[in-house]
Image (cartoon, rainbow, N blue to C red):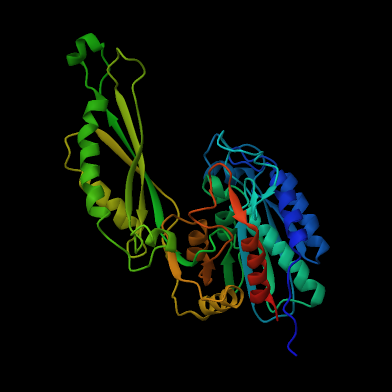
Amino acid sequence: MPDKPLCPDKDYLLNVLKDLIAFKTVAPPGSCYNEIIDHLVSVFKSMGFRTEKIVMPIEIFEAKCQDSRLTGDRVNLQASLDAGAKETLVIYTHVDVVPTGDDWSTDPFQMILKDGRVYGRGTSDSKGAVAGLIAALRALLKEGKPKYNLSILLTTDEEVGGYSGLCFFADQGLIKGDYMLCMDGFCDDLVIGSNGIVTWEVAVHGKSAHSGSSFLGINALEKSLPVMEALMTLKKAVQSRRSTLRASSALEAMGIKNLMPILNITMINAGIKENIVPDRCVLRGDRRVIPEETMDDAMAEIEKTLRPLDVDMDLKFFPGYPPMRMNPDHHWIGEVQRAIEQITGSAPKLSGAQGSLDQAYATDKTGIPTCVYGVGRQMESNIHAGDENVRVDDLVNFAKFLLALMGS
């Protein structure tokens, strides 16, 4: 008879998740980072991992993370296990969470089990995946050892830009392996690509004056109108394009079949009082870049659109994560697909993320083949919203998938 497949302990998995949710690792500002990493150090040490608590040096933090909302140490965990294997698998996700609002029906930091779902901040994004990983490792190491050497990266600050987490690891040369699995995703599809992101800022200059004599001034807010009009015209052109990479199943159900580039105007700030002509108007937004585009081309297109305008303005760009696209025929993608199919009964669709991923930065820096697969469902897990949740069955199946992927 064939060996009985390994199964994670569901009760243990849920208890691990309960403990993780209780840490209020809200970013910003970055609360309880030391506490949750110390807890995870203990957990991984108990399973035989070599652990290293990595704190970002303050000088790098001040240079790279210019966000006044962030306070305290930027703490991350690297846990390694030498299984004597020829190849190393890097597994990554983050343990910080977004703030909570008033739209919760339960305490967001107390795990609630109801109607086959687990509720709590981070259940889907992304503490549920951490709990699934720990439960899978516990079951696997009781019976033997994984077929890969393991490098586990659990980081912070992903929800506020991510540099002090995975991007810092990449720049410091701390990501070393043959393959990589990012668990910060959904279980709807297997993600092999994503859009990049560039944030932009336009500062329109004017001249202040009393509003009763507004003709003596230059209204920067009014001067920004042709800027917005030009950007909205460009938006139509940008968003008529499509990537050849398929969109997620959830977006495909809404009629969006392929990844699309996006141009957004998301912020405007002008004026200090109703009877003062504003001398400055600042517009901010972002540009989502499909894998067929480059970040430089996206920035140049915006600059070319605004250059002819007779407006006194300054344009700045803040490049973020690059676009990413893996070869769907790479054997690592097939390996992950087969592990998922072994648990769910069907091979997952290969798709791209309409959003942007810190994983793309790491992939660009290291060249390590990677894909993204997690525990949540895009249209039902309420990620970043009230009553965030995940199906218990999805948690258990995720742990089973990891067992299938890592097991001998």
Residue 121: x %, y % from top left: 62, 45
Q: Residue at x 21, y 14 (%)?
A: 214
Q: Residue furthest front?
A: 115
Q: In what quadrant of the picture does the C terminus appear?
A: bottom right
Residue 354: x %, y % from top left: 41, 57
Q: Is residue 249 above or below residue 406?
A: above
Which one is in front, 7 or 85? 7
Which one is in front, 337 or 77? 337
Is residue 292 toward the left or the right of residue 36 in the image? left
Is residue 90 toward the left or the right of residue 382 in the image? right
**Residue 306, quarter of picture:** top left
Residue 117: x %, y % from top left: 63, 53
Say whether residue 174 is visible: no
Is residue 212 toward the left or the right of residue 2 in the image? left
Which one is in front, 171 or 261? 261
Q: Residue at x 60, y 50 (%)?
A: 389
